[in-house]
Image (cartoon, grey):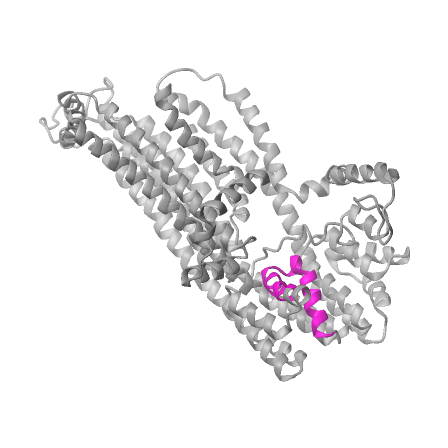
Amino acid sequence: MIAYLPLLAAFGCCLALLLPAVDDGADLVVTRVALSLFGDYVGEDGPRRQRQRDLMRAAHVAGTHRTYAAKTLLYAGVLGVAGSVIGVYAAAGLLSVLDVSEAALRGTLPASLGFVAGVTRLTELGLPKLFLLLTLASATLGAALAVGMYYGRWELLDQRAHARGAEIDATLPRTVAFMYALSRSGMPFPRVMDTLAENEAVYGEAATELSVAVRDMNAFGTDALTALQRTSRRTPSDDLADFAENLASVLGTGQPISTFLSDQYELYQEEAESKQQQYLELLSTFAEAYVTALVAGPLFFITILVVIGLVLEDTLPLLRVVVYLGVPLATFGFVVYVDSVTQGIGGTETVDLSEAIEDESGMSDTASAQADGNPQPDGGVAGGSPSADRWAASRERLRAYDRIRTLRRWAASPVESVLGAPRTVFLLSVPLAVVVLLVTAFPITLGPPTEMVAQVETPIVAATVVVLASYAVVYEAHKRRVRRIESAVPDFLDRLASVNEAGTSVVGSVRRVADSNLEALTDDLQRTRRDIDWGADVGTALRRLERRVRSPMTSRAVALITNAMRASGDVGPVLRIAADESRATWSLRRERRQVMLTYLIVIYISFLVFLGIIASLSVSFIPAIEEAAIPGAGAGTSASDLPGAPSGPGGITDGLGDINTTAYEQLFFHAAAIQAVCSGLVAGQLGEGSVRDGVKHVVALLLLTLATFLVIDLV
């Protein structure tokens, strides 16, 4: 046991590096150790330090460069030492495994691999050479882990910066539209920037990047020109850098901000259309490449290997590598590559609204109570002097109220809560499916591996279909509801602008529009009108509408309306801008779905061809081969044993009695199921922009697979 203590210590050090990610106390300890060891070294000025600082700013990483760089060196050093220890034990384990005779190993291996038996001579090395071997193994693994950790952490920042740049480019047009609309309403530019920073959760990464300039101006007294110029140097987005630089120039020359923002808004609308065309061309290319390389290619390869395996020589090991490793890994790489290349081009929604619509007022219940002058955590009241502990019970009730807020929401509206949380449905359905699988598929009759797998493969696929179907139903129901509502948002804004431009107040405009037919948005607007009739102000009523709908487009519209009302009662022009932006976004999405529908059909047809060929092999080819090998006599009789058949080696059916045709048929089923999952996920990503949208396609293709093999079994 003592001999393994260094190995356990090495693994303990590796696991200790994971603690800062889950525990703040451990992170503080690691940070202090890192700064005490490497703080002075990484604090020295130099070109590398400046590049790393710029990278951290582009990636929007919290913390200082000194802390991040010191922790990077600490992680690299710990992994280097731990890797060196693990390398010694790995080399010793290899020598222990090789402690067999060369003759025995050579007799076990095929003749073509006999040269591998020469590695057993490593155990005959003397002490000096053995020491050099262990030192080499230790240094190699330790250095690889240390260098990989050091450059990996900085490369991770580079990837995050690239991803943020793509998100900024995708959300910049709507951010500029928001700024243009507010400036058109008469709001001063500093207030426009403050309002944008307040709504960064709604408008995404572009607003988040500009909010850094707002914090520079508000917290440090930096002038607007300097703050915007810093933003242009810091941001990973070339588009935002140009916009911030041009905006700073306009502010410096005193030109009208609204005119500049109007020109930028029209420019980004045109660029959005051109990027949409580029995006659709990319998706078309990727769809054709996927069908050719990862559907038709594996099918052709599998067919060739099956023919060779059934006629000449067993190819099951190679087929298993192709089916179980080649196709899934190639599909995973394809999905990752497509996501990295097309990120931010298609205008997909990635805005997190959980913070923006936490409740009606955008604050938690406790924060709202504190803002109204109720007890503060320090025992005092807002705007008053600290008091005694007479508020302790009230504070505790508020904390308990906050802790069970999520449970209350689930209990108050369970259906809406389920529709809004597809992941929860998935997490609940997986254990249930596992329990049902254990009850229905077990006990398993012991026997050859092929027979044991055959007893559970169909129940596993069926359970997978049930789990994915439950997720897909909830996810699609929520998505279709949001899509129907968002399709009515441009009309809602247009009608609201028309009524307001006719001279009606905002309150009257909302009441008038709520009486019209806006399809999926009508019921929620009527509830908004009732809120106003019962005494709520328009801002509160619209924020309640935003909370009910939970749609990115609706959240942007509500944020724009409520903020424009603070500047002026004439919000008609502002609403026109919002309606145009919403209609343009909706048109781009609809065009994408229509164009990609063709390639979605191609993927389905390709999979059906895949199933058809596999069915032909199972129904026609394999039985014909078996009949040629077993012409009505014993199982081991081959075609060469028939009267008049040519004798001697070289017959096409020689050795067929040794081929396990059942294993090939089973592999066909597994290949079809794996291809169904891969094709479905790719179809969702190419057709609708996310692999989550492909879950419904996976369910459909798995059902086709089950139905096809059920028919094959009946035949």
**Which stretch appears magenta?**
188-215
User: Vertically, is 395 above or below 12?
Assistant: below
**Left or right: 467 as drawn, with respect to 331:** right
Question: Is 202 contained in the magenta span?
Answer: yes
Percent x, y of residue 58: 51, 60
**Left or right: 588 as drawn, with respect to 357:** left
The quarter of the picture where residue 537 lies is bottom right
Question: Is 38 contained in the magenta span?
Answer: no
* Picture quarter with the N terminus: top left
The quarter of the picture where residue 395 lies is top right
Q: What's the residue at 45%, 48% (across, down)?
A: 38
Q: What's the residue at 60%, 65% (across, down)?
A: 587
Percent x, y of residue 329: 38, 43
Percent x, y of residue 490: 69, 65
Q: Which of these two is toward me, 208 or 322?
A: 208
Percent x, y of residue 341: 44, 58
Q: What's the residue at 43%, 37% (across, down)?
A: 673
User: Vertically, is 180 above or below 132?
Assistant: below
Q: Which of these two is toward me, 379 or 710?
A: 379
User: Vertically, is 603 above or below 318?
Assistant: below
* Picture quarter with the C terminus: top left
Q: What's the residue at 70%, 58% (across, down)?
A: 555
